[in-house]
Image (cartoon, grey):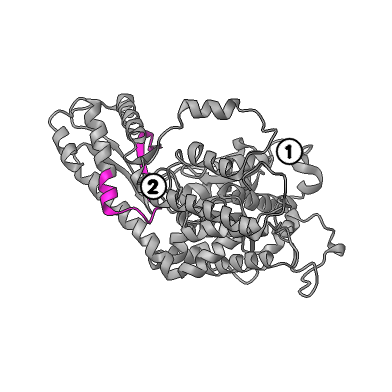
Amino acid sequence: MNGGESRFEWTAEELRTVGHQVVDLVVEHLTGLRDEPVFRPVPQTVVRGFETEAVPQDGAPVDAVLGEFAARVEPWPFGNGHPRFYGWVNPPPHPLGVFAELLVAAMNPSVAGGNHAAVHVERQVVRWFAELAGLPGTAHGLLVSGGSAATLTGLAVARHRAALRAGRPVREDGVQAGAGGPAAARFVVYQGTEGHGSARKAAELLGIGSGNVRVVGSDDGHRIRVPALRDAIAADVRAGHVPVAVLASAGTVNTGAVDDLAAIGDVCAEFGVWLHVDAAYGGPAVLLLPRFAAVRAALGRADSVALDPHKWLYAPVDAGLVLFRDGAPARDAFSLVPPYLRTDDDPAGVGGPVWFSEYGFEQTRPFRALKVWMLLKHLGVRGYRELIEHDLAVADRIAAAVAAAPELQLLARGLSVVCFRCRPPGGPDGEELDELNRRVLRAVQLGGGAFLAGTTVDGVFALRACVVNPRATAGDADALVAQVRAGLAADGAPGRAGQADQAGEAR
């Protein structure tokens, strides 16, 4: 296969030869990460090559194509595989998940439905997670691209149910149904200040509108204020609005906050409002660790749950999951098959179980479940507990180092998220302090020694570290804090004189 051939059929020997080359590239990438910078921007010369290269007219040899990958793509990764990467919620892939993706690509099925193995694997994965979440036997779900798609799917079902109750059949007439009635009647959803932005996108896509997303204030722990939530729903009901759903969080991506799901569940039950829980990031900790037993029990009351195995379960992107307490409303919201034509379980025939495409908006669906299934088989609940506890311990190490540094200030600590900022004694405050922290962040990110993200906590700019990386060590945690202190020292901010030596010793 060294010529630019159009031949589609490869021999067993050709497949093995190229397969070994690809595996070698995978091995070199995964084992060489620690010796490389955590992050480095793609050089402009390489970028310009991507932007200007013409569409290939004649094929190139396989060796040349793989060589281009090695030279132009692999050297500039996102950085999330490195043990000192703590930006956002992007873990390294477990090696078995990498190879699972190869097996999926070889099979290349569409998992809309049918009686083939991929369908049954996904059904088993959904059932496992529903059991872990404490959902009843009526539960259903499906794998989607990620937490945003899971939230959109869950909220679509919630809107469908709320609209039917209000006599507004949105599937037939759209959200304009009933527009001739009271002008003030609106679909409304509720989330906290720390809620994920995907909820607003979902509200816009579903015709609810971001202006009808009620943002409920947070308490000192960055959790939804439950009394304020109840007051907001009660006020909307009195005004004739239609409360669609409350979007709570089991681990916000910003600060790691876990809402009081039990109390929020009580409010939802009181008003008959759908409860959707965004557990995309924190779900694995809640589902698997004994310390979160109370949260897990409350999670079992949710009507829908979003969870991302490609986050804290270390599966390769993409692997999101949406679970429903009852699958029937989801099927009613999405199925385009008339009830009298529906064919339910056909275990011995071609049709197989009820198709996944009746429970969501994707028709062609990739075999996302295999990597999740294989990792659960390989690691088990106990193995995952060890990895997640490890991440929490590394986050604790970062938080402790921040607390011990006089020029650093801890702002928030939840799950494996640590938010802090540089605040040197005698240094600037207000916007000047925010700008100082932005400069330090950029210096650390481009320095290559460690990586963290920037965010806003309680109205001030913060440095945010999120640990979802079992390769990280206590030494890596210390190195991150040392990089921040060194960046502050190099910035020359007022009040830092005399403390630079401390940063140097920390390195």
Snapshot quadrant of residue 385: bottom left
Q: Quadrant of the C terminus?
A: top left
Instruction: Please identify the residue farthest to the right as the structure is shown.
Output: 340
Q: Residues within 10 Å of mark 2 (few under 14, many from 20)?
A: some
Snapshot quadrant of residue 300: bottom right
Picture layout, residue 278 above or below residue 115:
above
| Local secondary structure at mark 1 | loop
Picture layout, residue 360 above or below residue 497:
below
Magenta residue check for 468: yes
Q: Which residues are magenta?
A: 456-479
Q: Position of residue 356 (x, y in %)?
A: 71, 60
Snapshot quadrant of residue 290: bottom left
Picture layout, residue 355 above or below residue 176:
below
Is 35 in front, or is 218? 35
- Tell me which amino acid carries mark 1: Pro
Q: Position of residue 410 (x, y in %)?
A: 28, 43
| Local secondary structure at mark 2 | helix
Q: Which residue appears at 21% of the width and 27% of the height?
A: 427
User: Can you identify the residue that label 1 sits on?
Assistant: 182
Is 135 in front, or is 357? 357
Residue 169 seen in render:
no
User: Can you identify the residue that label 2 sits on?
Assistant: 33
Left or right: where 245 falls relative to 24: right
